[in-house]
Amino acid sequence: MFLRRLIAPLLIFVMAIAMAAAWDLVVETLGLSNYASIVRYGRMALEILAWFSAAFLVIRFINGAIWQGIVQRRSGVSAPRLLVDLVAGVIWVAAAIAVIAQVFGLPMTGIATTSSVAIAIIGFAARDMIASLFSGIAINFEHPYRIGDWIEVEPNVVGKVLEISWLTTRTVTRDGIGIIVPNARLATAPFRNYNHPHALWRDSLTIALDPMLPAERVERILLAAMNAVPEVAALPNKPDVKIESIDDRGVSWQARFWVDDYGAMPETRYAVQKSILKHLHHAGIAFAYPKRDLFVSRMPERLLDQRGQLKLILQRNELFADLTDGELEQIAQSALVVVCRSGSAVVHEGEAGASLFVLVEGLLYVFKSTNSGKRRIDELTPGTVFGEFSLLTGEPRSSTVVPYGDALAFEIGKDAIAPILKERVEIARRLSCILADRQARNEIVERELQQDVDTDSKPANSKEWFERLQSFFGLG
């Protein structure tokens, strides 16, 4: 293919040289000796054709042998278009100068003098354009940014590079607004490149919280919130939490996470903000605000009513929707606080159990045994209730639950709910319907998403579940 592209310019060059060398013979053969102008201009035309066909042949050779054969093959990318055009332009100019000097016989000193004056006038008039031109050449050699990179030339104005031309760089913002930046500006002023030295870069959110909150608790909640976002958890660089400042409003915490695509940054930041709000809400923590405390005696220690928060979570769950405030308060007061340590399972699949857990802080991963080994099937965030089958029927644990980082949960045992069910059997009947519905939904999910899980067992109906509740709690 490379040699085939050289055939046409090579034939033209050889024919022009041959015709120029044999021009006298051609003139004599055709009987044109008496036509001096035809003889003269014909020879000049052939010489001009020979020079420009030679330039065309050299350009074709450089394109095939150097730009494609060496640069593209070794680097894997095409040579910069600006550089290719610049080299071709230099060759054409050299051929034109050779024609002027050799064909037309003009002295080079006169050409140089005239060109110098013209260049000075043109250079002064187009100095900005020339600066952008040479800046474009430097940009194509240095590669401070490439097509597809996100660059910030002005504060808070970021665009994706679409084209790097001789004079300008064309970008488009996330809002679809095109921005054209002169290359001279990019070569002389600092700018940010969100894709180099690598695609990963760190974003952060500032959250002001009460200074009386333990640092370990805040770290646990914010880390769990950020890792609950799949786009953040999937990256090799993990999020972290730092203190930015401490002032009269409280402690300003920095939730720092990594992003691998600036174009997706608003969506990722929005997902992290939603997750943080959810985790703080379920933990019963509100944002701090500027305040002043006036007191004449020692201030009492500020404590967050976590059991009151547990009561609110239970109210929102369908399992406890029919209970009165007194019954919910009774359950919340009898619940046990469970600190789940990182990597240590809260419950194991297949083990006996007679309690339910309510997650209030942190992040839990759910694993289930399959034919190919243990597999992670779900993740639990604050406000989630799990273990209801074991609490209400004594069924073995259906999965293994392991915390990501430290987590905090409440454990509600059989003794806390047994008196309520014995007094109000209609609640047991409603719970039976809920358990039957949940088991049916779990079977569907496992069949669709976990084909290698053994799901051949037939789901029990509400009547069967009610019988199990009767037997487990000794109901009449």
Image (cartoon, grey):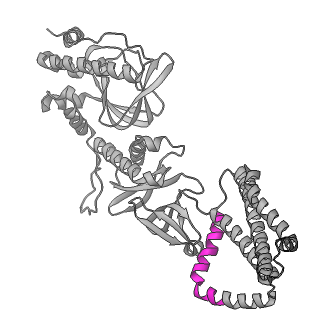
- Seen from the viewer's position, the closer of residues 174 and 311 is 174
Q: Residue at x 80, y 83 (%)?
A: 36
Q: Which residues are magenta?
A: 120-142
Q: Residue at x 13, y 33 (%)?
A: 325
Above or below, 281 against 415 in this view is: below
| Residue 38 x %, y % | 77, 79
- Seen from the viewer's position, the closer of residues 102 and 61 is 102
State the image quarter where residue 403 is shown: top left
Q: Residue at x 24, y 39 (%)?
A: 309
For residue 193, side relative to residue 414 (left or right): right
The question of residue 29 being in magenta is answered with no
Q: Residue at x 71, y 68 (%)?
A: 87
For residue 28, side relative to residue 449 (left or right): right
Above or below, 98 against 316 in this view is: below
The quarter of the rendered structure image containing the C terminus is top left
Q: Is residue 255 visible?
A: no
- Seen from the viewer's position, the closer of residues 208 and 212 is 208
| Residue 451 x %, y % | 42, 19
Q: Is residue 73 visible?
A: yes
Q: Main secondary structure of the magenta part?
A: helix
| Residue 19 x %, y % | 83, 68
For residue 335, side relative to residue 328 (left or right): right
| Residue 128 x %, y % | 57, 81
State the image quarter where residue 100 is shown: bottom right
- Seen from the viewer's position, the closer of residues 211 and 324 is 324
